[in-house]
Amino acid sequence: MDGVGNTMQKKAAELERMAEVLIIGEQLRLRLHEGKVIKDRRHHLRTYPNCFVAKELIDWLMEHREASDRETAIRIMQKLLDHSIIHHVCDEHKDFKDMKLFYRFRKDDGTFPLDNEAKVFLRGQRIFEKLMNTENSLLQTREEEGVTFERALVASEFVDWLLQEGEVASREEAEQLGRRLLEHGIIQHVTNKNHFVDGELLYQFRMNFRRRRRLMELLTDRCRSIPESQDSPFCLRRQNPDRRNTSFHSVSPSKEMKVVSAVRRSSMSSSCSSNGYYSSSPILSSSPPVLCNPKSVLKRQVSPEELQTPGGPYIKKTFTIVGDAVGWGFVVRGNKPCHVQAVDPSGPAAAAGMKVCQFVVSVNGLNVLSLDYRTVSSLILTGPRTVVMEVMEEIEQ
């Protein structure tokens, strides 16, 4: 590899793994606060603020299908303890035990160790969120050396933005920050050939801080060697072929119902092929990919003009879908317009009324009839947890 050596790549992978643990821990902490699992508790006339009971948490993990059994739940929480994300309230237990013991997230009591790596990660996360939440044109589809890259930014424009936002005091400081973000696996040159330089080269964020992680990801030591794909963040995948759990339903053109076994939906991208999508995860499962929906569920492709024709055989519906910890529970496919290819019957989308074969008209007020499914998926993935979607559904004759 030119420019960035193998040593830097290995270090970036290790730092990226550390960052993933921090993200998973923070997402879990917020969920537990929201579910009132974390709260002030009393024991022997003493109050312990912002803590949880280990035994109750294991029950919660199993209830929310984050762990298949208590042993797995303990292993997950031990990972967080080993990485100093949580600790026993009195620091008397170095192991996470399935008992009525109080544990606490270090971020809730101010004891989280902020070393240099953690500081760079947290700064990178803040910059990523600011870019996502502000109206700007930095992240665009751009071209370098004849190749097109999605959601790429020009280094010099990024430096300008950092100065404008007060993140740095000079271009030299901005370039140093860019180099640190690259060395920590947060951004990368689009072809991975160059370090960060204040110029016209293109860079992308390697890490999607908003992707909702599964806790099981803590139990694998494998790191991604490529950026997270923007190819539909809702791909269905089987995470454990031995588990019997929920099923994903899709309707084939012949109206036959197909059932694809799966643990849960996920907002993390899976490997996709040109003729369908796979039900496997390169991170969570070592089993080979299983092709689950090789064909479009549509009988025929429909144009945007046909959908919008007054008096046509389509009715518009609006859904408000609140994503849970692992996604929204549906798959989009197709092009101009895209359509709903599959829906998890136990997920948020199904609860809101979404069905297969519906055509996506708008996402959070933005008309997407002229966009393909990759772009629509990216809009949803990088947007807020609550998604408002307008769809067109064919009226049954």
Image (cartoon, rainbow, N blue to C red):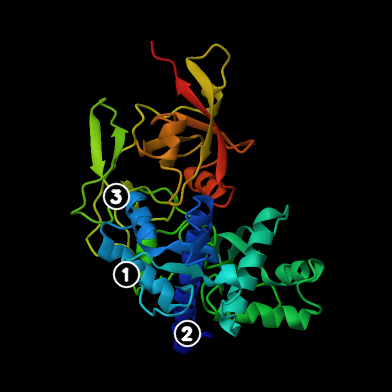
> Which numbered dot is residue 263?
3
Measured Cα–Cα span from mark 2 to mark 3: 33 Å
> Which numbered dot is residue 75?
1
Q: Which quadrant of the view contains residue 182?
A: bottom right
Where's residue 146, x and y in %? 55, 64
Circle 3: residue type:
Val
Where's residue 53, x and y in %? 42, 62
Q: Residues within 10 Å of mark 1 (few under 14, many from 20)?
A: some
Left or right of 157 in this view: 382: left
Which of the pair 395/382 is nearer the observer?
Answer: 382
Q: Residues within 10 Å of mark 2 (few under 14, many from 20)?
A: some
Pair 2/1: label in front: 1
- Residue at 78%, 79% in the rendered image: 171
Q: Do tag 3 and tag 1 residues touch (Cβ < 8 Å)? A: no
Write down the residue under mark 2.
11
The answer to whether residue 20 of the structure is visible from this angle is: no
Circle 1: residue type:
Arg
Measured Cα–Cα span from mark 2 to mark 1: 25 Å
Q: Nearer the N terminus, badge 2 or badge 1?
A: 2
In the image, residue 190 above or below residue 340: below
**Element at badge 2?**
helix
**Element at badge 3?**
loop
Where's residue 169, x and y in %? 81, 78
